Amino acid sequence: MSISRQPSFLAALILMLIIFVIFFIGIGVLNYSVEFILISVTIITGFFAKHYKVSWKEILTAFVGKIKDAVPAMLILLAIGMLIGCWMISGTIPLMVYYGLEVINPAYLYLTAFLVTVCISTFTGTSWGSAGTIGVALVAVAAAMDVSLPITAGAVISGAYFGDKLSPLSDTTNMAALAAGADLYESIRNMLYTSVPAFIVACIGFYFVGMDLNAGGNVQSDTIFIMKDVLNKLFWLNPLLITPALLVFVGAIKKWDTIIVLVASSFMALFISAVFQSFTMSDLTSAAVNGFNTKMIAYFSDISMNEATLKNINVLLNRGGIYSMVSPIVVMLCAFMFASALDVSGGLNVILNSLIKKLNSVTSTILATMFTSSLLVGCTGNAVISFFLVKNMYDPCFKNNKLHMVNMSRAMESGATLLEGLFPWTISGMFMAKTLGVNTLDYCPWVFFNISCFLFAIVFAFLPKWSNFGTRYEIIEER
């Protein structure tokens, strides 16, 4: 058996630069498929690892280990795909859209989308669940009002990650605190220093970008009236249709198993559809597996509507199904294959280990933790994986600077959790893009909360040079 050897710092740095350039040009500039780019960098990284006596078997073994950890995320993806299809055919999402069109002022759509998703994500603790349920409905409302889908998606994702970062029910909030070795509620309180000002900035931002919506008020009012009328004709809309959504909400509060709750809500929606809507059993199963399609509505072609309304209705309703999540899962597999090759090559570890030796201040330690978390989530596609890697690397630095571990938890959340959905190749990035129907790079500039919270975290990293406000230190007992 060959014995692997460690790559030099220069070799590792060149590898990482090549990977970054391929990602930036391939995805950001040329808009090539994420899967192709991930396979390409995996091959390059694999040959790099092979040069340093790492076998393909070791890469595959690491890959299998990562896939094992990712299976729950894959199952959630499939469950949410089924959920969306079932909520469509039951009329649950159309009802949410109808009520949304009823009460939402177009001028405040973006701000409303942000605040509503903040509430849902905080109560449920899930960014995916919030975006995949109320987020889908809000984007559909935006489509009906003929306003910017990227900005609406940005508002939804901003609100979704507010709760994902601060809710005690959130898996990433719990995992960040667990990985850092900090108390959960102490960690949440410490994150308020950056989250509260970021929340205010996001509210102001979404209010001002929505001010221009007033210009098309009359046109939007006509569009809203037509859309409401068509939805009312396509489905029997009544308050009982909201029941599947309430089940998801209660399940999150009670901390029931996520997958079981999502599947139960899907079957409840199918039952409601069988009772209240005029679909066949074949339509119900097809909606769950392949997604809902307006062709399932027998009298759809008989309803009078203009071409624009027809397009909006199809964009709104034709979605969901288990197979709609196959593409994100394929990307996930490609991302984990790349992460496995990068992990066993040792290239990233060499760079990070060299960096750690230069960290001798509070500011440099916190900044390094943040940016390393961002780098790792970009490379691995998973925030939770980056938490434990960062903990192992920077634990001595935090102890040397007498920093309380809530600072590490906040830095990891700021660098990993908040940015995870902004990379097109990560699990969350693919999920948000597929679920909301907006490309990752299109909604990125409008994710005001995530971006501003990351920037405030940088500000708080520099504050210890002048003030300890927002930075907590360990209390060293005299012996």
Image (tube, rainbow, N blue to C red):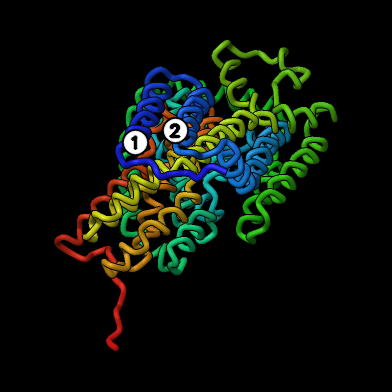
Q: Quadrant location of the C terminus?
A: bottom left
At mark 1, the secondary structure is helix
The structure residue drawn at horizontal position 34% and vertical position 36%, both measured from the top left corner, is 11
- Where residue 413 appears, as percent x and y from the top left, is 41, 52
User: Counting other residues with Cα less than 10 Å from the Cα at mark 1, is it few (<14), some (14-19), or many (20 or more)?
Assistant: some
- Please give the residue where the numbered disc 2 appears in the rendered image: 48
- Where residue 125 appears, as percent x and y from the top left, is 53, 54
Label number found at residue 439: none
Please, is residue 251 above or below residue 268 in the view?
Answer: below
Specify the amino acid type for callout 1. Ala
The structure residue drawn at horizontal position 57% and vertical position 10%, both measured from the top left corner, is 307
In the displayed structure, does residue 169 sit left or right of residue 25? Answer: right
Q: Quadrant location of the N terminus?
A: top right
Please, is residue 304 above or below residue 402 in the view?
Answer: above
Q: Decide which of 97, 347 is in the foreground and name it.
A: 347
- Please give the residue where the numbered disc 1 appears in the rendered image: 11
In the displayed structure, does residue 164 sit left or right of residue 192? Answer: right
Compute the Cα span from label 1 to label 2: 9 Å
Q: Decide which of 394, 151 is in the foreground and name it.
A: 394
The structure residue drawn at horizontal position 47% and vertical position 36%, both measured from the top left corner, is 49
Check contact, mark 1 vs mark 2: CB within 8 A: yes
Q: Earlier in the sequence, mark 1 or mark 2?
A: 1
Specify the amino acid type for callout 2. Phe
The reply to whether residue 141 is visible in this rendering is no
- Where residue 71 appears, as percent x and y from the top left, is 65, 45
Please, is residue 245 above or below residue 40 in the view?
Answer: below
